[in-house]
Amino acid sequence: MSQAYGRDLDLNLLRVLVVVIEEGSVTKAAGRLYLTQPAISAALARLRQAVGEPLFAREGRGLVPTARGRRVYEAAKPHLAGLLESVTQSATFDAMKTERVFRVGLADDARAWLLPHLLDLLEREAPRAKLIVLPVHFRTVVDSVLEPSVDLAVSVADETPKSVAREPILKGGFVCLFDTTVWGRAPKWTLARYLAAPHVIVSFNADLRGVVEDLLGHERNVVCSTPFFAGIGALVAGSRRIATVPEIVARTVLPRYRTLATAKVPFRSQAIPIELLYKKAREHDAANTWLRAAVHRAAGAA
């Protein structure tokens, strides 16, 4: 093969050979390829020169392949057919039949409110597919999405490169999570009372600062910092500890703990969008397109 490339073999010449053999004449081949007869003849001459042997012999008014021409034809035709199909036909994806392993990055909170619905959807619509979940957060999500094996991710995100597409799937504010047996059913959460209460926060920086300190400028009485939203209900239940969590997280916690309730935070909080992120290079991939739609539908069911 390297020698053929060294002779500057134009692979388009193989397409001319295949069509001439199929049509049996230069005239018919020229019409099929939208070329002139001299152009077809010149292409065959160049191919003969590259191969070093005659590829056709005249028979009456037509052309028949030589033994070498037939061998080249039989070797080239299936590859040309596959290349042509890949260019002219759009890829399809059959969710019910696929055995694909999807790799999805999910932020900690998304694993609680999104993952169960996504698994239910896959069970119904893509029962042979498998799902591998990777942990991400706003500092790591871009690096995760850029990994070749990762299909997409769901997380809060900062700035992203132009190669990463973003689609908002959920937007919500924060609420205060507390135990009613300690604080009562409807405590009056003044700002001073809220800040003085013992707080459990979720921080990916392994420090005692969270969104309230960094974005809103308030300093809370933080007694515990954890990197996970999972288990936040157990840290609050039966104690004076409170937690400030996204509304969607609170909706997954409350059914498990009957004594817990939520209240509005005593300050204006900005809603933070949770987004679906993926490489733009995957935008028209049939399987990735289906998976993105599935994530949106699962988010809508949450």
Image (cartoon, rainbow, N blue to C red):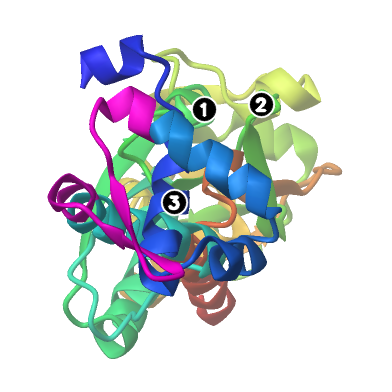
Question: Left or right: 248 with respect to 35?
Answer: left
The reply to whether discs 2 and 1 touch (Cβ–Cβ < 8 Å) is yes
Question: Which residue has dot 3 on it?
Answer: 15
Q: Nearer the viewer, residue 218 or 144?
A: 144
Between the C-alphas of marks 1 and 3, the distance is 43 Å
Using the image, tell me which numbered label, if any, was put on residue 142: 1
The span picked out in magenta is: 48-72
Residue at image position (60%, 66%) is: 27
In the rendered view, tell whether residue 116 sits above or below residue 75.
Answer: below
Q: Label 1's element?
A: helix
Q: Label 2's element?
A: loop
Image-quadrant location for residue 14:
top left
Point out the tag, 1 or 3, that comes first from the N-terminus.
Answer: 3
Q: Label 3's element?
A: helix
Question: Which residue has dot 2 on it?
Answer: 160
Image coordinates of residue 1 in percent, x first then y, are 21, 22
Point out the tag, 3 or 2, that comes first from the N-terminus.
Answer: 3
Q: Nearer the viewer, mark 1 or mark 3?
A: 3
Between the C-alphas of marks 2 and 1, the distance is 7 Å
In the rendered view, tell whether residue 94 sits above or below residue 61.
Answer: below
Image coordinates of residue 13 in percent, x first then y, are 45, 40
Question: Left or right: 20 with respect to 77?
Answer: right
In the rendered view, tell whether residue 221 sits above or below residue 246.
Answer: above
Using the image, tell me which numbered label, if any, was put on residue 132: none
Find the residue positioned furthest to the front. Answer: 60
Residue at image position (52%, 58%) is: 87
Residue at image position (75%, 32%) is: 192
Residue at image position (19%, 51%) is: 75
Question: Left or right: 272 with respect to 285?
Answer: right
